Image (cartoon, grey):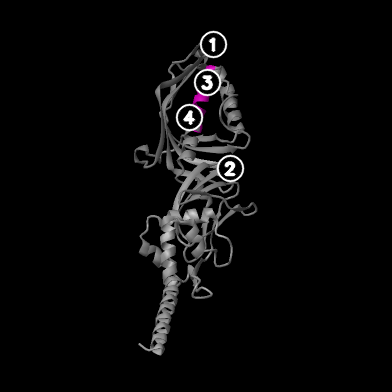
């Protein structure tokens, strides 16, 4: 081999090595290779590699650890090819080539936001992918803005606490891939199907009849009746008028039910109306002067009741009971909240001052 030939061979070899190196670097730092490596890093939750290939949002804002954690929870059940497909979606991620063949391409996710609007006075706790999140709160609109998040479909769980309707938890899937999302909570959704609210109303009804029993035993004194001021005064006035003609007064009950599908709330959130069943029995024995020897009894058991919200006590109180209804059939009620005591709750009062509780 001549010197010239040898030199040419060396040059050719160097050219091949340089070309191969450049080709390898180009492939290594190409968009496809970057997507592939970022997908692996995301599935492994490799923070160093993630930051290298996905340094920020497309608006140059920092990707927080919380946002990455939520995104990881979203991806960890996916296969690599699914993650690669997601990263290549133009409307969600922007891929930019490196400034030279020695620098890798980088991927920039579009920042996504979630807005939750609630009725006034409602407090909120929310999680995405089982991760607690906090957001920017605007009191004027009772609006929470969460984010930014990386594009994806997430499981949202939010618990709302309303001063009048209690707590209620909802779940839904939110799609933050193509655009921001807004969840608007309507007022009626706070009480419709809200079992805590239903149980509160049932407890209010039971407490009312319990306190009525107590008032009977305390000389027909309804001052401690768990009812609205207006209703309490009406009941006391009615019993005061009736008392001179009474020899005895008895009341007993054991079961109370409410039809949850009948619950309605007025626009001002000040009154609730519902259908109620109670196995109530009342009897009155009149004094001899009236000339009626037989006891007067009543066992009307279906009622339409109204409760009003007491701002001081922070609870719903009995306000009206209408037993003159023939439209109810508790056997057909589909969604019911029920109470049943271990035994009948009885109260007795008589003119001689004897009191009996069984």
Q: In 3D space, how far apart are the residues under numbered discs 3 and 4 (Cα atoms)?
A: 12 Å
Q: Quadrant of residue 328?
A: top left
- Which of the image's four quarters has the C terminus? top left
Indicate whether residue 212 is drawn in magenta: yes
Q: In the rendering, at what x and y percent does residue 44 appear?
A: 42, 56
Residue found at x 43% / y 80%: 14
Q: Which mark is residue 270?
A: 2
* Residue 184 visible here: no
- Label 1 belongs to which residue? 353
* Residue 239 visible here: yes
Q: Which mark is residue 206?
A: 4
Q: In the rendering, at what x and y percent does residue 123 appear?
A: 57, 46
Closest to the observer, 330 or 131? 131
Contact between labelled residues 3 and 1, with CB atoms less than 8 Å apart: no
Contact between labelled residues 4 and 2, with CB atoms less than 8 Å apart: no
Q: In 3D space, how far apart are the residues under numbered discs 3 and 2 (Cα atoms)?
A: 27 Å
Residue 33 sits above or below residue 206 on the image? below
Contact between labelled residues 4 and 1, with CB atoms less than 8 Å apart: no
Residue found at x 51% / y 61%: 51
Closer to the chain start, of discs 1 and 4, is: 4
Q: Quadrant of residue 153?
A: bottom left
Which is more foreground, mark 1 or mark 3? 3
Closer to the chain start, of discs 3 and 4, is: 4
Q: Which residues are magenta?
A: 204-217
Indicate whether residue 38 is drawn in magenta: no
Local packing at callout 1 (Cα closer than 10 Å; few below 14, some 14-19, many 20+) is few
């Amino acid at each position: 081999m001549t010197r010239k030939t040898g030199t040419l061979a060396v040059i050719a070899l160097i050219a091949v090595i340089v070309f191969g190196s450049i080709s390898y670097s180009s492939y290594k730092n190409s968009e496809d290779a970057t997507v592939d490596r970022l997908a692996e890093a995301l599935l492994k939750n490799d923070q160093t590699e993630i930051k290298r290939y996905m340094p920020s949002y497309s608006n140059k804002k920092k990707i927080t650890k919380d946002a990455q954690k939520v995104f990881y929870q979203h991806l960890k059940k996916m296969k690599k090819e699914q993650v690669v497909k997601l990263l290549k979606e133009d409307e969600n991620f922007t891929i930019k080539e490196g400034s030279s063949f020695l620098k890798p391409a980088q991927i920039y996710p579009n920042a996504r936001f979630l807005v939750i609007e609630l009725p006034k006075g409602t407090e909120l706790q929310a999680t995405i992918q089982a991760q607690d999140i906090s957001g920017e709160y605007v009191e004027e609109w009772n609006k929470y803005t969460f984010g930014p998040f990386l594009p994806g479909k997430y499981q949202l769980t939010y618990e709302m606490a309303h001063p009048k309707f209690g707590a209620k938890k909802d779940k839904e899937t939110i799609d933050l891939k193509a655009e921001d999302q807004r969840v608007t909570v309507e007022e009626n959704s706070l009480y419709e199907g809200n079992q805590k609210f239903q149980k509160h109303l049932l407890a209010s009804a039971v407490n009312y009849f319990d306190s009525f029993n107590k008032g009977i035993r305390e000389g027909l004194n309804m001052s401690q009746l768990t009812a609205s001021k207006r209703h309490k005064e009406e009941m006391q006035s009615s019993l005061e008028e009736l008392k001179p003609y009474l020899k005895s007064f008895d009341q007993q009950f054991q079961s109370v039910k409410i039809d949850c599908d009948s619950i309605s709330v007025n626009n001002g959130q000040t009154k609730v109306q519902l259908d109620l069943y109670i196995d109530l029995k009342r009897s009155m024995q009149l004094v001899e002067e009236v000339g009626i020897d037989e006891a007067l009894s009543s066992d009307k058991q279906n009622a339409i009741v109204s409760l009003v919200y007491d701002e001081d006590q922070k609870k719903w109180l009995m306000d009206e009971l209408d037993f003159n209804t023939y439209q109810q059939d508790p056997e057909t009620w589909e969604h019911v909240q029920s109470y049943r005591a271990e035994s009948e709750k009885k109260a007795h009062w008589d003119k001689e001052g004897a009191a009996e509780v069984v």
